[in-house]
Amino acid sequence: MSERDQIREQKAEELKNNRNTSDSEESVSDRDEPVHVESAQHLQDLVDEGGVVLTDFYADWCGPCKMLEPTVAEIAAETDATVAKVDVDAQQRLAQQYRVQGVPTMYLFADGEQVEQMVGVRQKDQLLSLIQQYA
């Protein structure tokens, strides 16, 4: 079994375990940690709630994604924006739907509409400024 297959298996197990613990309802303002997206419908539900949603398409094997991870977590904790994380290996169809060709790719949604797309690592202050612009 390759390392990639092991990572995929581990992620699938984590997702299965998270489903059991994340079934309780939470309001948008209660989210101070990134939300791991489990399906296209899950992401659509987050976007449809309104407000600002920063969506981070990432991969576990991606070095720049790992560099960006603490920044994304801080943004989730420090802002009212919902931060959604999409594992492109686990959610390949969703990544294709959003035409993600490289990781990290981030989409910013405001009031249910896509307003920004960014490819590559971004600085925290740049992301915060974008979020505030649409908040």
Image: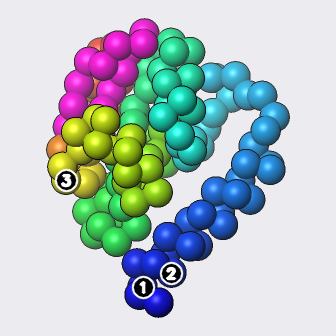
Q: In this view, does 27 lie above or below 74?
A: above
* C-alpha separation, residue under disc 2 versus residue under disc 1: 5 Å
Q: Residue 130: x and y, percent?
A: 28, 24
Q: Give the residue type that dot 2 points to.
A: Gln
Quarter-of-image position of residue 54: top left
**Amino acid type, callout 3:** Gly
Residue 86, image x and y in percent? 44, 47
The CA span between labels 3 and 1 is 20 Å
Disc number placed over residue 3 in the picture, else none:
1
Q: How many marks?
A: 3
In the image, the segment drawn in magenta is 106-118
Q: Distance between the residues labelled 3 and 2?
A: 22 Å
The numbered mark, 3 or 2, whose residue comes first in the sequence reads 2
Q: In this view of the protein, which residue sits in the foreground, 31 or 105?
A: 105
* Residue at numbered disc 2: 6
Q: Residue at x 42, y 85 (%)?
A: 3
Residue at the image point whose x is 74% and y is 59% from the top = 17
User: Does residue 69 lie above or below 115 as drawn?
Assistant: below
User: What kind of element bears circle 2?
Assistant: helix
Tell me if residue 109 is in the magenta stretch: yes
Say if residue 123 shows up in the picture: no
